[in-house]
Structure formats: C-alpha cells, structure tokens
Amino acid sequence: MLVVSSREFREKQAEYMDKLDNGEQIIIQRGKNKAYSIMPIKDEEIYFSPQMIQKIKDSILQAKQGKTIKIGNSEDLEDFFKNL
C-alpha cells in the first residue's frame, strides 16, 4: 500500500494510475486529517452499484414468476399511481 500526498499524486498521476492498474493500493493524504483510497473500477461498476444490480436481478426474477402489473391504458396507469 502506498500513501502519497495529494500534491505528489497530482504531479505523478499517470505513474500512480499505472500502479493501480497493477494491483497496488493507494491512499492519498490531504492535510492531517483527510485521506482517500483510490482504486480502479470494472466496466460493470461504472453505471450500477452492486445494490442496483441486485435490485435488477430481483426484478427480473419477479417478472419471471409473474409478479407483475399489466397496464393497458391510461386509466390503468392512473389507478396504479393512486394505489402506490
């Protein structure tokens, strides 16, 4: 694990990004009482958090089990929103 100052990180950003890509953990120290962990993210993590991915999986399962509401017209939609 590397601990570097925010200034040093800014000055050598590309070097530290390469280290991150090679599995190194980096902590950026900002002042005396602030520190940040930086790590690469995977493509699938860019848009969805693990919690959101689980909600999507749960929703797909509910749909497969037939636990859905069919809305065929605007009145059905109005009723749906009234009952939320």
Image (cartoon, rainbow, N blue to C red):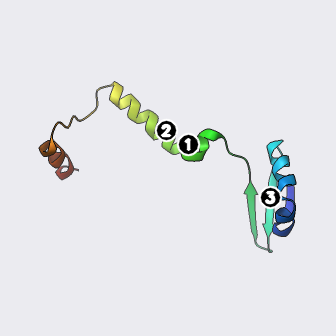
Task: State the image quarter where residue 48 is shown.
Answer: top right
**Label 3 Cα neighbours within 10 Å, binned few <14 / some 14-19 / many ≥20:** some
Which residue lies under the disc numbered 3? 27
The answer to whether 16 is drawn above or below residue 68 in the figure is: below
Which residue lies under the disc numbered 2? 54
Report how far apart the C-alphas of labels 1 and 2 lie in the structure: 6 Å
**Label 2 Cα neighbours within 10 Å, binned few <14 / some 14-19 / many ≥20:** few
- Between disc 1 and disc 3, whose residue precedes? 3
Give the number of the disc on residue 50.
1
The residue tagged with tag 3: helix, strand or loop? Answer: strand
Question: Which amino acid type is shown beneath numbered disc 1?
Answer: Pro
Task: State the image quarter where residue 13 is shown.
Answer: bottom right
Tag 1–tag 2 contact (CB < 8 Å): yes
| Residue at x 42% of width, y 34% of height | 58
Question: Which amino acid type is shown beneath numbered disc 2?
Answer: Gln
Q: Position of residue 83 (x, y in %)?
A: 18, 49
**Label 1 Cα neighbours within 10 Å, binned few <14 / some 14-19 / many ≥20:** few
Residue furthest left as drawn: 75
Q: Is residue 52 left or right of residue 66?
A: right
Report how far apart the C-alphas of labels 3 and 2 lie in the structure: 29 Å
Question: Which amino acid type is shown beneath numbered disc 3?
Answer: Ile
Q: Is residue 19 left or right of residue 50?
A: right
The residue tagged with tag 1: helix, strand or loop? Answer: helix
Task: State the image quarter where residue 6 is shown.
Answer: bottom right
Q: Position of residue 47 (x, y in %)?
A: 55, 46
| Residue at x 40% of width, y 31% of height | 60
Q: Position of residue 81 (x, y in %)?
A: 21, 50
